[in-house]
Amino acid sequence: MPFEALDEDILLTILRLSDVYTVLMVSMTNKHLRRITLSKQLWLSLVQERAFRDALELPPPDREDLENRSTEQLVSLVKNAVIGPDSSWPDECSSGTQTSYEIPFAERELYDIDLLPGARYILLQIFKREDIKLYIFDVWTARRLWQHSAGVRTPRWNIDLVPGDPKARVLVARPVAYPTQTVYIEEVDLQTGVSQELFNSGFAGVFGEPDGIAGDFFLCTMPNLFVHGGRVLVNWRTSTFVAFGRVGLNSAVKLIPGYIVSTYLEHSPPHQQILAVTALEAFSNYWQPLIEINRVQLDNSSVTLPITMQMRMEYKNRPLGARSVTGRLIVTPSALHRGAYTVDVHCDLPPEDPTLWGKLGKLIEARRNRKQPVACRVVLSFRFTPTPSPGEPCGLQFVSAQPFQTFFPRAVIDRSNHSITVSYRPC
């Protein structure tokens, strides 16, 4: 039976379980399916979906307000949310249209605040002489969900928010004596505040700077391999690890469930910048007992990062190469494609005339106009789709390339003497 021949109620049930991209593709099939995809209940479901709102860092949905909107207004709201911030946002914010939440906070000690992915929770780090404390707060309810004493040495931390599950896994690396640290992981129930320890290294190891945690794995930069971009990948559940050598010059590395996303500059001509993806299963033959990590560090022994798939980076048919610098590698869940990721790579664009005379000409022109020469930065966007099922390949697709513009985050933090305020800018 053809898909469009199914009963309308069945079709709507299927579409409610789909992502925004699938609904849009179905709407372009024919007039019959387009009429069904314009159901108000369908778009109410899409705009309130937790994964969609977390990916775009939206505040909690105002259900009464959404119910009073037409289907066209709901579609427009989703469109504006996906397109993201623009130059009009600061004016809108100054007009008082943003949604704000205040957390009373009278702490006078020095502290740092980090807004966690999804922009619903913050991690607060308070520095005191006798102890350094970590806290997690729920922004929307102003509840303190978790606290931890990290000792007198400044810890390094990273957090994994479990998709579809109101839980967070907090990775804390506590310095002992340079370059060694102890590492532990706590799981926090973000509804009840109940926490439990999942992992404790039990010894001081050369774990380095935590790069990220995802599922059963965490990634660290190795101190004595730092100049080569060396990393260590740890499976905390099995207490095993693998060290891999330098990714390359101007490299960046991110860990997501099941994969490592990285950039590097290839050694051989044409010396182009590469975006690479490595499946964690590619390390299956290299795992070692975690207790051996200090010895391996001293030996400086490591494996080459096994790349599963890769893509060359270019802008307007100009390859990004030796003169390009990867500024940032940002990997976030896709708001349009469920289960996929948006990969943004920020690069400096090489000059059109890379010769010495070309550089001097630009410099002379800039001084003549009394302006400082500004490096042109571009943002390359890709979509990464993990393997849908065993035996099937994952996907890496180029989406867009455009000059970098000033970014206005959707959620911003403001601190005062007596409170912490998180404001969400409008869609």
Image (cartoon, helix red, strand yellow):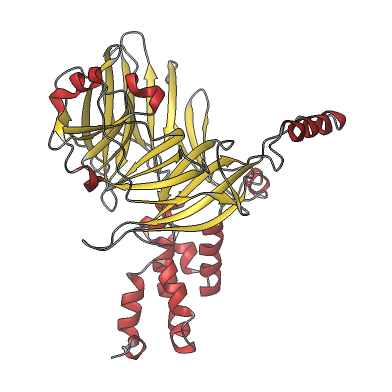
Q: Does residue 81 appear in the picture of this structure?
A: no
Residue at x 43% of width, y 36% of height:
252
Image side of residue 352 versus residue 313, left or right:
right
Depicted 208 relative to depicted 401: above or below: above
Q: How many marks?
A: 0
Q: Which residue corresponds to the image point at 42% horizontal and 55% vertical from the top-left?
A: 53
Work out whether residue 358 or residue 57 is closer to the camera in this orientation and state it.
358
Along the line of sight, the residue nearer the viewer: 313 or 222: 313
Residue in the foreground of this view, choosing between 138 and 350: 350
Q: Where is residue 8 in the image (x, y as percent from the top left)?
A: 35, 86
- Quadrant location of the N terminus in the rendered image: bottom left
Q: In this view, does 342 lie above or below 234?
A: below
From the viewer's side, name the closer residue of 370 and 168.
370
How far across and how far down the image is residue 257, in percent?
28, 47
Quadrant in the rendering for residue 303: top left
User: Quarter of the image containing the C terminus?
Assistant: bottom right
- At a point 63% along the width and 54% down the height, the residue shown is 316
Residue 73 position in % (x across, y down): 55, 69
Residue occupying the point 38% across, 40% down: 254
Q: In this view, does 332 lie above or below 176?
A: below
Q: Confirm whether residue 354 shows in the render.
A: yes
Based on the displayed image, in which of its 4 quarters is residue 135 positioned? top left
